[in-house]
Structure formats: C-alpha cells, structure tokens
Amino acid sequence: MEAAMYPVLKNCRVRGTEDEYYLHQYFTGEEYELDSLPAKILHECAGKRQIQWLAENFRQSVDEVKTFLQTLEAGSLVEFAEKQRKTVFADISSAPYLREVHIDATGWCNLFGKCKHCYGRQVFEEATREQLTTEEMIGLIEELGRLNVANCVLSGGEVFIRKDLPLLISHLAEQCIHIAGIFTNGTIYREDVVAALHQEGTRTRFLVSLDGHNSDIHDFMRGRGNFEKTVAFIRKIKDAGFPVTVNTVVIRQNVQHLMEMCHFLEGLGVALWRISVPREQGETIINREMILPDWTDVFAIYERLIRYAIASVNGMRFQISSIFKTALLEESVYYLFRPESCCCEYKRNSITVKPNGNVTPCTAFDNLVLGNIRRMSLSEIWYGDLAQSFKQLPIKETMCQGCELLPYCGGGCRKVAWEMHGSSLAKDESACPLYRFTYDTVRPILREHGIRAEILDLPRPYRYDASLINKVI
C-alpha cells in the first residue's frame, strides 16, 4: 500500500459526537466504538485525502496510519483508490447527537377499530388528514442525511399501506441511513417492498405483532382471519432472508398460554420475542377491564420465561418488558439508573416524526408536540429548548425521587405519568408493581447467574427546563 493511495470508507460512516464516536455499517447496523483521533481520521476517508496527508495532518507516522487502515480493510470497512473520489460525508454532529428517527409514515391502518389496545387510533386518524407527501418525506430523509442520523425505524398506522414505501427505502439507502426496523401488523405482504430492501442491500428486521399462538387469541385482539395472515407473513419474510421479531402484548386472554406461544414462535424460527403488558393509553384505557391481566399471573409467567430463556441461551432471544433481555446473559451486566440519569434513557437520542409532520419525543407521547417539520427544520426542533428539556430531564426532577425502586425503573414512562396525573413529572404508578417484581424476584435470578449490576455513567450535562414540558401539553 502506497502513501499516495486514497482511503475510502466502505458502506460505513463515522457517527456520534465528541467522546461518543462510533463507526456505523449502514447496511447491517453494526457499530464499532471509536476514540476521537481514529474517528477524525476516518471522517477524512472520503476519497479526497491521501494516506500521506492523513499522517501529516494528524501527526502520525505513515506506517501507523497504514496499519490502522489495513485493520479496517480486513473487516471490509475501508477500501483504497488510486485516484481521488468525490464522496460527500455529513458533518460530524454537535451534541446532543440525534442517533435515530422513528417515522410513523402513515396513520392509515387496515385494522382500525379492531385492535383492542391501540394506543393512538384517534391521533393517527387526525394526523392522516394532513399526511406528508412523497416529496415531503424525501425532504425529511435528506435532512436526516445532513444531520448524520444513523438509524431510521418505519412504522404506522400500518406502514405497508404507504404506496411509496419502496421509494422511501431507496432514499434512506441513498442517504446511508440504516433501516433498523419496520413495524407491521403482518397482514399485508408486498413483493415490491422486499425487492427494494434486497436491491439496496439493507439488512433490516421486521417487528411483527402477534398476540397468540392460535386464532382464538390473536383474532380476539385484532380481528377475524388475521392470525393466519400474520403467520403467513412471518414465514414469507423469513424465506426472503430477513430476521423477524414478534411483539406480543400480554393480556388476560393469553397470559396463561405464553409458554405455548413461546414454543410456537421457536417453531416459526423467530429471532426475538418481545412481550409486555400494554401501556394504559388509548384503547387500552377503554378496554382495561376486558384485556388487562392480573399482575400475579403476569409475574408467574415472566419468571418462568426468564428461567427458560437463561436455560436456552442459544435459541430464540427474549425481551421481557424492560426487565430482562437475552443480551444480559452475553454481557453479564445490567444497568441501574442514577438520579441524574435521563428519564427516558432508552430513547434519549431519538425522536419521532408523525404522519402529519408533528415531532414528538417518542411514538407514544403523541400529545407533546415539539414542532412540525413543515414549519421548522428537524435540526431546529431537535436542538430546541423544548425537545432537549424533555430528552435531558433527569429522574431527580420527578416525584419518584427517593424511592428504592428508582435505580431499576428510572421513573417509569413520562407519558403514562401524564395520562394518570396530568403532569409528566408525576409518578407512573403503573410501573411500580413491575419493578417491585424486578427487585424482589428478577434481581436474585440475575445475581444467581453471575449477572452484575452497574450504575449508568453520568450523562453529558446539557440544558433543560422542566417547567417547559407541562406548559405545552
């Protein structure tokens, strides 16, 4: 390798911001942590700079730069050109980094009026009246590219209803943005969508809703005939080469049958099973008495499934609410919140765009509108005081401070707290039973299997104004 060669990143980009850099493979979603100097060197590997220039500019020897780049070449992350290329990289982001954008691409759903737990039927119906056009969606995707956003999640409504979905997939690939997931009810299979994903080389996962191992249970929740459609969809998607995650809401009708469902999903070859009790919002509030299970039954099956997951670590992966996932067994550690941790640490670096362009902290918190992309840029919204006051809000500002369960629950869900008490700083009391179970039952199981607790790092300090949040809801 000559010092006059031009190194070029291959199917990857430098993401993040100061002290939080990583190299991101945008077809597969794989990530590799980077220190500041390697990140800055790689950001210059766009086909414009020679190895000699990199060495001189970053005060390294040519041999050191060559060795570093050859290591990445071996992993198919860098290639070398004899002549200059014109590859355009987005600027390195300023803090706080916007890592992921969840796009509710449409509010339309072919199961409207059927799902007994739908969290946002009314909001989706209203948002769809002013749905973003294809041109507006492309403009949004281009801004995501300029912001160096790594991941995008596509959802609805039912996203497969959106006719221009293959075109949106193509534009996301053009902007080097990984499609981290596509949420669907699994009743509409489209060859053109699968073909677009294959053509762009995107290794996405499909997150499919399935609430029972038979039609009696699933169709009770989502309408007659949909069990067979969804199971057929899962098989087709798997045959097309994509991993499938199944999302299941734990309800009165299936809580006694979840072990049977576990074995059913294993037989289907599902990669990951995510289960949780539905949040108390939307249709769940209306149908509470009909569908919400007793916590005693929930905890009994949760414990059984956790022990089963530990015993079958090489099989289907599990995510049981927010209290257990198979990854804990691989990492041998779980993390505890500190008072300074952000309330929604899970989504601290993400944001949601609704069908009408409204931007919200997450897909569930639809009544906290941070702005609209028809009137403001996404950059203005993300870096604005309101968005960051919510994203950076520390747990110590909530009424949960001082509770012994706080390190485990992180204060629960701010949306549910608002639904219950009219304040996003109030207690999410729906989370208390779950995390009492976590503390009393799950914690000893994890300890028994050598999985230790560690406290989350202190978040990077950033401005926030807790009073802003309740003023706008």
Image: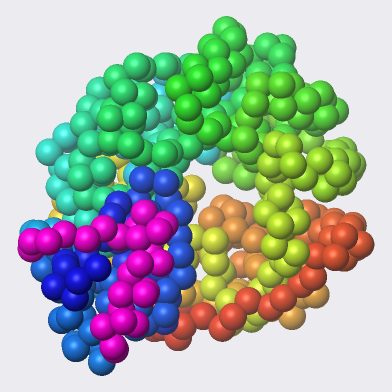
- Asked if residue 374 lies left or right of residue 165, the reply is left
Q: Who is closer to the viewer here, 218 or 372?
A: 218
Q: Who is closer to the viewer here, 206 or 422?
A: 206
Residue 124 lies in what quarter of the image?
top left
Q: Is residue 89 visible?
A: no
**Which residue is depicted at the point 33% across and 29% down?**
198
- Asked if residue 17 lies left or right of residue 275, the reply is left
**Which residue is depicted at the point 52% across and 38% down?**
119
- Locate residue 244, reporting x and y percent: 55, 31
- Locate residue 408, reporting x and y percent: 73, 67
Is 109 above or below relative to 466? above
**Which residue is depicted at the point 36% across and 45% down?**
27
**Magenta highlight range:** 60-84
Quadrant assignment for the C terminus: bottom left
**Furthest-top residue in this view:** 225
**Which residue is depicted at the point 54% across and 61% down?**
346
Residue 190 lies in what quarter of the image?
top left
- Locate residue 426, reporting x and y percent: 61, 67
- Asked if residue 378 lies left or right of residue 223, the reply is left
Was residue 182 drawn as part of the magenta stretch in this picture?
no
Is 164 above or below relative to 13? above
Was residue 62 drawn as part of the magenta stretch in this picture?
yes
Is 453 above or below relative to 367? below
Residue 213 lies in what quarter of the image?
top right
Quadrant assignment for the N terminus: bottom left
